[in-house]
Image (spheres, helix red, strand yellow):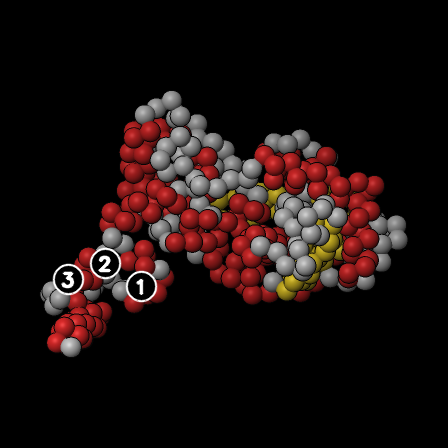
Amino acid sequence: MSSQSQLESIRSTAPLRPPTVRVLASYADHTDCNLASLGFAARVDLDRLLVGTKFQAPFGQSPFAFSRGTNFERLLRANDYATPLRLLQEKMGFAVTDARTINLRQVHAKNRDGMRLRADDTRALVRKILQQHRDAINLIDGAVLEATIGGVAAHFEADALAARFSGPIHAGEVKSFPVVDGRADPDKLGAALDQVSVYLLLTKRLVDDLGGNHALVSPMAMLITPCNVALAPTLSVMDVTKRIARTERLLATVPDAIAIADSLPSGLNFSAVADKNADPGRRIDALHDLADRVGTAYSPNCISTCGNALFCRARALKAAAPTLSGPNAVRLLPGVNSLIRAAELSDGANPSPQERPVAEHLARAGRLYDEATLQAGRN
């Protein structure tokens, strides 16, 4: 069985989530979690996996927000992208005379073969840009970039525009959240910039693969959003150099998805978890079975970015995992598996070899705490 077929078998009847730049940017913060890595590689939509259970994801795009986003993108594509081209001229000084545009979403079918063909087109279009061919496209809408993540090859759809005029190759994102008085929701803005960072990183790799100089890819992210509460578009430009480097470091740590899949018994997959007709408790038990076999790595930032977050938080609470107290607690408690064990070591319990480096510090902290509380009681 091929690796792709194996992962499809593991996804089984679970809801499918195609790999987009948005999905990849969200997953980049969870590369240390084997359950998230398996779900990502198998293209399981974790945001919908637990619908109907007590651990259902507490987020998702509302129909109003979806409609607003669709209308905003339609406005930007009108008249052969006249509005984005005007913004690029006004904000970035790009010459837009006789600009050439293409919407790859309209060229090929919306399926796996279509994604592969769009990736081929993207590659050919970028090659012409690098060659400064006179017929090179200036704006690419719906570019598809190839990448191998955790040993699995995939195609990632850029949810925006890629632009290149005289000078560097630029990339951008289209978002429907407003920028009011020059300010945007910091969480939404951060997520959007993370997505552009992934897009730029994959574009750099493509340029390298084509024999070009990846320095031609600008680290300046372009973000097209509504200005204030109306849908009038505005263009913001921000340096994402550090975000690109961070994304590259995170993706370099992605575990081998096939190795994780090989650790599962034959026939074990996400189907029992996704079955909305089954008892919710049985669905949760099935996910616990998967999680016990591959492992999870909950952290507080999972709540806003991973559909399994509430489930994994409950597991962390049951285990009194140090991660519940944040990343600093994890860093300060190497080799200690639970907060309960940390308290025992602070009371002078005999440490195991792996606990020994931190046990002395915990015991000293415990003594200082006892002395302080004793002194407070006397006063």
Q: Which residue is mark 2?
A: 339
Decide: few, some or many residues near mark 3? Use Cα within 10 Å; few <14, some 14-19, many ≥20. Answer: some
Which kind of residue does numbered mark 2 sit on?
Answer: Leu
Q: Which residue is mark 1?
A: 329
Whether residue 320 is situated above or below residue 104 in the rendered picture: below
Q: Earlier in the sequence, mark 2 or mark 1?
A: 1
Q: Please give left or right for residue 160 compared with residue 147 in the image.
A: right
Report, in whole angstroms, how far the alpha carbon at label 2 lies from the one at label 1. 9 Å
Circle 1 sits in a helix, a strand or a loop, which is it?
A: helix
The x, y position of residue 284, in whole percent, is 32, 34
The x, y position of residue 118, in whole percent, is 67, 40
Report, in whole angstroms, how far the alpha carbon at label 1 lies from the one at label 3. 16 Å
Which kind of residue does numbered mark 1 sit on?
Answer: Ala
Which kind of residue does numbered mark 3 sit on?
Answer: Glu
- Camera-side residue: 178 or 275? 178
Q: Which residue is mark 3?
A: 344
Q: Residue at x 66, y 55 (%)?
A: 180
Q: Specify the quadrant of the image occupied by residue 253.
A: bottom left
